[in-house]
Amino acid sequence: MVLLEEYRALREEVTQRVAARMQMIGFAGVVSAVLVVANKFTFDGPSVYVAVLLLLLAVVWLRGINLAIQRIGRHLRVVEARINALAVRAWGSSETVLTWETDIQTRRVQVRGVALRSGRLLGWIKS
């Protein structure tokens, strides 16, 4: 039961971080757009530079969140494996009980091309 509770809590943490990530992307985009159009897109005023700086900080923050999600995901896969091994011992079934993070990681390592490079840059895919 303790492992299942840890698994549930970690999944909830990942879900919350993904939601926070999307909110930050939206917030940074809206604020940057407002700052850019505030001075009719001239390089004389600070708004363009503030907008670019804000977007850069958002990307750095996004990468940090994505790397934290990757760390949680690695631990989730360990917990999944432990729970699945206990289920095999308890019920004698070879069918896996928990696969959420393992399935996500399987799809993640199959990414190629531009998506792989941008995923590595932004921390979605661990190199």
Image (spheres, rainbow, N blue to C red):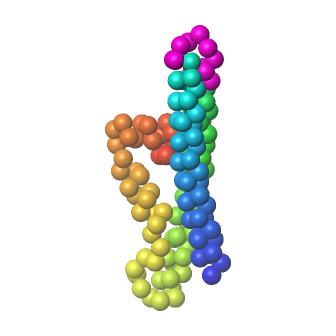
In this view, the residue in front, 101 or 11, is 11
Per the rendered image, the range of residues in magenta is 40-51
Residue 26 appears at what percent x and percent y? 53, 42
In this view, the residue in front, 88 or 71, is 71
Q: Residue at x 40, y 51 (%)?
A: 109
Q: Is residue 14 left or right of residue 113?
A: right
Q: Is residue 109 left or right of residue 67?
A: left
Examine the structure image and report whether residue 49 is included in the region drawn in magenta.
yes
In this view, the residue in front, 2 or 18, is 18
Residue 83 in view (yes/no)? yes
Q: Residue at x 34, y 38 (%)?
A: 113
Residue 53 appears at what percent x and percent y? 61, 26
Residue 1 appears at what percent x and percent y? 63, 81
Residue 63 in view (yes/no)? no
Q: Residue at x 47, y 46 (%)?
A: 125
Residue lying farthest to the right in this orientation = 2
Examine the structure image and report whether residue 14 is included in the region drawn in magenta.
no
Residue lying farthest to the top in this orientation = 44
In this view, the residue in front, 15 or 63, is 15
How many numbered dots are placed on residues in this image? Answer: 0
Residue 35 appears at what percent x and percent y? 58, 26
Against 38, is 4 above or below? below
Q: Residue at x 58, y 33 (%)?
A: 31
